[in-house]
Amino acid sequence: MTISFGDDDPFAAMLAPPPNETASERAARLAREAEAKRVNDEIEAQLKLDRMTFKKQKDTVRVLLLGQSESGASLNVLLQMPVLTRLRRQVHNTEK
């Protein structure tokens, strides 16, 4: 598939190299473009990994416990985990 830019295309003028570009300017421009592409590819790869990680962790439930450090909130949650797990399974089964 070939993409051609017409005279009325606003991106054609922006993407075209300057008409009076020297060889050293061209080399510098191409180096900047290559570096920008490398950085972009790294970002895209990281986003892909993040998406895959998110899909794997989609069923993860995170709980923020607030209160005094010795209030026993974490113990209460641990004691209630069987109940919470059973409720989660019931909700998950009714959604299907």
Image: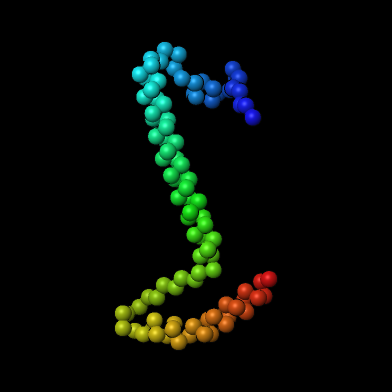
Q: Quadrant of the N terminus?
A: top right
Tell me the residue at 48%/85% (across/down). Answer: 80
Q: Residue 94 placed where, x, y %?
A: 67, 75
Give the camera-side residue of 33 and 15: 33
Q: Residue 43's quadrant in the figure?
A: top left
Give the tally of numbered discs: 0
Side (left or right) of 65 relative to 84? left
User: Would you place residue 38 above or below residue 78 in this image?
Assistant: above
Q: Residue 21 placed where, x, y %?
A: 40, 15
Q: Residue 29 placed where, x, y %?
A: 40, 25
Q: Residue 55's quadrant in the figure?
A: bottom right
Tell me the residue at 66%/71% (across/down). Answer: 95
Q: Residue 64 placed where, x, y %?
A: 41, 72
Side (left or right) of 95 relative to 24? right
Q: Quadrant of the C terminus?
A: bottom right
Colouring used for the render: rainbow
User: Would you place residue 56 above or below residue 42 in this image?
Assistant: below
Give the camera-side residue of 72 and 67: 72
Tell me the residue at 39%/85% (across/down). Answer: 75
Furthest toward the bottom, the residue is 79
Give the camera-side residue of 8 and 18: 18
Tell me the residue at 41%/35% (across/down). Answer: 36
